[in-house]
Amino acid sequence: MKIAVLGGGTMGEAIVKSILRKKLAGRDDIVISDVAKPRRDVLNNRYKVKVTGDNLAAVKGAEVIILAIKPQDFPAILGQLAGRLKSQLIISIAAGINLDTICSKLNYFKVVRAMPNTPAQVGKGMTAWTSAKDLSNKDREIARSILAAMGEEQYFADEKYIDMATAISGSGPAYVFLFIEAMIDAGVHIGLPRNVATKLVVETIVGSAETMKKMAKHPAELKNMVTSPGGTTAEALLQLESGGLRSLMINAVAAAYNKAKSLGAK
Ligand SMILES: NC(=O)c1ccc[n+]([C@@H]2O[C@H](COP(=O)([O-])OP(=O)(O)OC[C@H]3O[C@@H](n4cnc5c(N)ncnc54)[C@H](OP(=O)(O)O)[C@@H]3O)[C@@H](O)[C@H]2O)c1
């Protein structure tokens, strides 16, 4: 499968790394196009794939074109591609750029819209995606295989869920990293060395997520298993609830969702 990735930033690199790891395409079949020469050199050294600064040269002969540039660079790229597409599958990962915008600007419908997240960098991504209605099952499965190479994937027939997923799994790693940072600071505050606090926190987060995945229990049930009557955990939970952690999270996610919707409406 010949793949062109336009935009070799954080996400473009994560996609290429995943495709190579899962052997969906060989090094000779992947071209990354990026405006920045130093970035192209890094990617070429790291992955031994072809690199170019010319988007049109990159898409020549490609069967799949992945759009991994920032939303503000989309109008220029869509303008470049319009009228030049015949049978290529387009996969866009841009936040807030909806299928209607992409399909109408390109006058082309073989388009998938995906929202991956940064854990894709280590093969633990969560990607929500949808596709233009007329996309064939074969193209949908090609898209699925590429997105699944980054970790887990979830297809939505209705595009409205992509903005919701953006607010949960797309932006979510930032919420979790903020929580992790705060918990490490708390450990340091009570006297733990920072490196030890970091290990305790990271393993606790990974272990808790794995427990929930494997035991498939409601989070409240798992929380109750840690919380003995009149104990230390109950004291901490009182503080978190009094500070409004739950409503704060709901408001934060709602704000991200509204922002994602407003980007799409522009
Ligand atoms: N980061 C996330 O958590 C995340 C999650 C899901 C989806 N996304 C989406 O993924 C896309 C890429 O995000 P990112 O974080 O990977 O951004 P990024 O690191 O800034 O990567 C974009 C790359 O594209 C290059 N570029 C700019 N204009 C170009 C052009 N005309 N042709 C070719 N390359 C060009 C940029 O170069 P310069 O830096 O020199 O401009 C940069 O290297 C965005 O649309 C974003 O919404 C991001």
Image: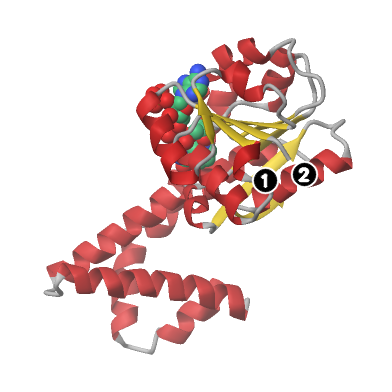
Left or right: 51 as drawn, with respect to 67: left
- Name the secondary structure under disc 1: loop
Discs 2/1, front? 1
Mark seen at residue 239: none
Query: Which residue is the site of mark 1?
Result: 25
Q: Residue at x 76, y 35 (%)?
A: 131
Query: Which residue is the site of mark 2?
Result: 142
Indicate yes or no: mark 1 CB to ligand 1 under 8 Å: no
Does residue 206 lie above or below 115 as drawn?
below
Q: Residue at x 79, y 28 (%)?
A: 110
* Residue 227 vs residue 121, the one in the foreground: 121
Residue 54: x %, y % from top left:
54, 17
Q: Toward which corner of the image does residue 217 lie, by quadrant? A: bottom right
Q: Toward which corner of the image does residue 49 lie, by quadrant? A: top right
Quote the CA–CA distance across marks 2 and 1.
12 Å
Residue 141: x %, y % from top left:
80, 46
Mark 2 neighbour class, 10 Å CA radius: few under 14, some 14 to 19, many 20 or more: some
Display coloring: secondary structure
